[in-house]
Amino acid sequence: MLADLLAAWNVPAGSTPLTVRKASIAAQESSLWDVERRAIGYLEQVERDLDAMEAFGEDVTYYRECMPVWWAAVFSFDLGWQQSLNTSVSLMDRGELRLLRALAGQIDTMRLSPRVQPGQLAALRAKLEESLQLVQATQPPTLDDAAKRYMLTLVHEALRVVDEVDLVGAASVRRVVFELGGAMTTVAEQTPDENEKKKWHESARGFLVEIVRQAPAAIAGAAADGTLGAITGG
């Protein structure tokens, strides 16, 4: 996706970088800055995937050497964005673009970034909405005002990244959702009321089950049977 976007941002003669980038605004985006944010999200995901590949023992030297080129292509700081160009300009040479496409293929093969299907997102969002209702309805002593504001912030952030997964990447969704799961589990463990404890554990388990479904089958099964149960008291 990043390679296709950067290739689309090459500037033909007689046009401007600003005009070209505005043409790539997607249906769910409202401005040029949404497109820039999407590109930055892709690059951040690439960096996380390179870390994972390196942890697996893969040599990622060439990819890391190209990261500054890919970041520069996203911002194109050396081009006047509103300046009409006399000649066509590519944001990077063909070799650097081919390397980015090769990296995407390797990431897909290794399944480092499992794709989130629309049905999974809808189910995850529904569970998060249920958790939002729980937080909104909970009163002291289970949640004081400060803790309630914090929990509401986490739930709304989780809902936002689910809605913007194409911009922020699936890894951001997993990170934010697991952070929320940890916070809700902490609330459950600290309340002396057994009914409240059960409600908070079940609510956290509801959306955590949906997020682990995105992982490869073996990992998802282990998480559901082991780690997930430990987190949510199941």
Image (tube, helix red, strand yellow):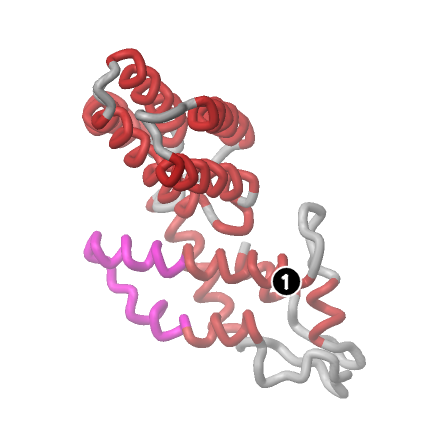
Main secondary structure type of the part rendered in magenta: helix
Residue at x 51%, y 68% (from the top left corner): 97
Q: Which residue is pictured at 59% across the width and 59% down the height?
A: 4
- Does residue 137 show up? yes
Image height of 59 relative to 222, above or below: below
Q: Position of residue 65 (x, y in %)?
A: 35, 75
Q: In this view, does 156 lie to the left or right of 228?
A: right
Answer with the quarter of the image where residue 111 lies: top left
Percent position of residue 159, x then y? 51, 37
Q: In which quarter of the image is the N terminus?
A: bottom right
Structural crowding at the residue carrying mark 1, measured as other residues with C-alpha within 10 Å and reported as few (<14), some (14–19) or many (≥20)? few
Q: Mark 1 — residue?
A: 33
Query: Which kind of residue does numbered mark 1 sit on?
Result: Trp
Specify whether 223 is left or right of 171.
left
Element class at badge 1? helix
Which residue is located at x 39 percent, y 24 percent?
139
Identify which residue, 176 or 85, lies in the foreground: 176
Pick out the residue farthest to the bottom. Answer: 86
- Determine if residue 222 is in view: no
Q: Residue furthest right?
A: 14
Q: As drawn, is 9 to the left or to the right of 217? A: right
Q: Nearer the viewer, residue 158 or 77?
A: 158
- Residue 162 placement (x, y as % from top left): 51, 39
| Image x and y of residue 205, in percent | 33, 23
Q: Nearest the camera: 76 or 182?
A: 182
Question: Total of numbered circles in the picture?
Answer: 1
- Residue 82, compared with residue 112, is above or below; it is below
- 176 in the magenta segment: no
Q: Residue at x 62, y 59 (%)?
A: 35
Which region is colored magenta?
Answer: 46-67
